Image: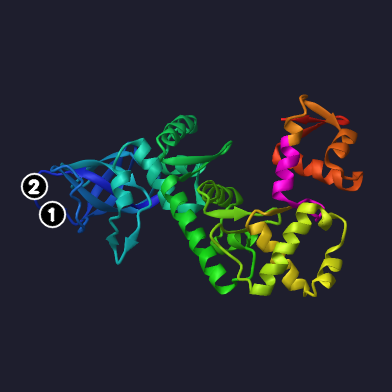
Amino acid sequence: MTRTLAAIVKKEAKELDWPQSVQVVFGRQKTSAKLKTAAAATDWLKPNEALILVQLHRPLDVHWGDRFKVFCRPGGQEVTNGRVIDPSPEIKNKELVVTPLLRLLSGQREAMILALCRRRGVRGVRGKEIVEFSGLPPENLLPAAEKMELKGLVRILGFQPLFMISTESLTWLAAQVEAFLRRFHRLHPEAVGVEVEKIKKRFRLPSLVLSLALARLKREKKIIAYEQGLVSLASHEIPLGPEEKKILKALEEMCYRGELRRVSLEEIRRQFRLSSRTLEKLLSHLMVKRRIVQSANGFYLHSLWLEEVINRLRNLGKREFSVSEFKALTGLSRKYAIPLLELLDEMGITRRKGSLREIL
């Protein structure tokens, strides 16, 4: 139900002078109304068309694309006819705000859906909203959305119910998240990254939309995502002093030899006379550089060592292996072998199959 709408009408004269009050008829619905021609440039219209603001005397059930006729008075001469392009337009100072979205709304169904996606921005638009706006049958929306996704105009985030976002909005969001991370690193140079939950609250985003933006940045190698729920710019480097660089090299060698699996972080901290914060910073630096990987239960693995283990698994000459075979292959005790297998499962290298593991 609306009392104000934007519409495109046919015109004959170059200048339009509407009667003070007219009657607008939508099928069986009718009411008195006032018409006002948009003052902004509308060079995207045909020469015999005009963009107008229609202010209805009483609310009518009107949707995008609805056709109507305008009479000078009830039972009088027809003044013009047209179609609705926006049943809920933006109004400022009693004037119709002419935006690029109105131009899209003046087009066909696909352009209208794209306009709604862009209007909703990073919040995305749901099928129910499109149906309420346009009056289109719900079953017609999914085929149209899939066609638009193939053209790269939108991304479908959900099918039941339909939920999608414009590619333009997703591109904008990815750029905003990247800028947010850049500011964070400038203010907190020693921090590994930002919590994903913090980004979600900052931009007030649905989890699905944020995941899509982060996946895009990760695919473009602009960010690094960590298992602890942190993300950082791929270009970010934690500042280190000369002494810290020496300790960093020693830590990396210890990790490659497997010593970080045999001693606690507290013992390492005492050995190198480090504060807890400095040790965390050094280990974080190695993770940022992808030199080490932290397993689910907290111990650290050198990425080269892990890569060697993966290559040995793939060269076993068989698709399945037992935990005992894995212990013999790596030289690890069961205490460390099981968490490492779980990490390989998460990485998609292996898959549990009863008491065995399958190499994927």
- Kind of residue sitting beneath label 2: Ala
Q: Viewer-proximal residue, 353 or 140?
A: 353
Q: Viewer-proximal residue, 28 or 65?
A: 65
Tell me the distance, in whole angstroms, between the alpha carbons under discs 2 and 1: 9 Å
Question: Does residue 87 lie above or below 245 as drawn?
Answer: above
Please report contact status of discs 2 and 1: CB closer than 8 Å, yes or no. yes
Q: Residue at x 51, y 65 (%)?
A: 182
Residue that mark 1 sits on: 17
- Near mark 1 (Cα within 10 A), the count class, few <14, some 14-19 or many ≥20, is few
Which quadrant of the view contains residue 67?
top left
Which quadrant of the view contains residue 350?
top right
x and y percentages locating residue 234 in the rendered image: 55, 57
Is 294 displayed left or right of 90 in the figure? Answer: right
Question: Does residue 205 lie above or below 247 as drawn?
Answer: above
Instruction: Name the secondary structure under disc 2.
Output: loop
- Quarter of the figure with the C terminus: top right
x and y percentages locating residue 237 in the rendered image: 58, 65
Q: Residue at x 60, y 72 (%)?
A: 188
Is 221 displayed left or right of 298 in the figure? Answer: left
Question: Does residue 238 lie above or below 172 as drawn?
Answer: below
Residue 13: which numbered mark, if any?
Answer: 2
| First to last magenta residue range | 294-311
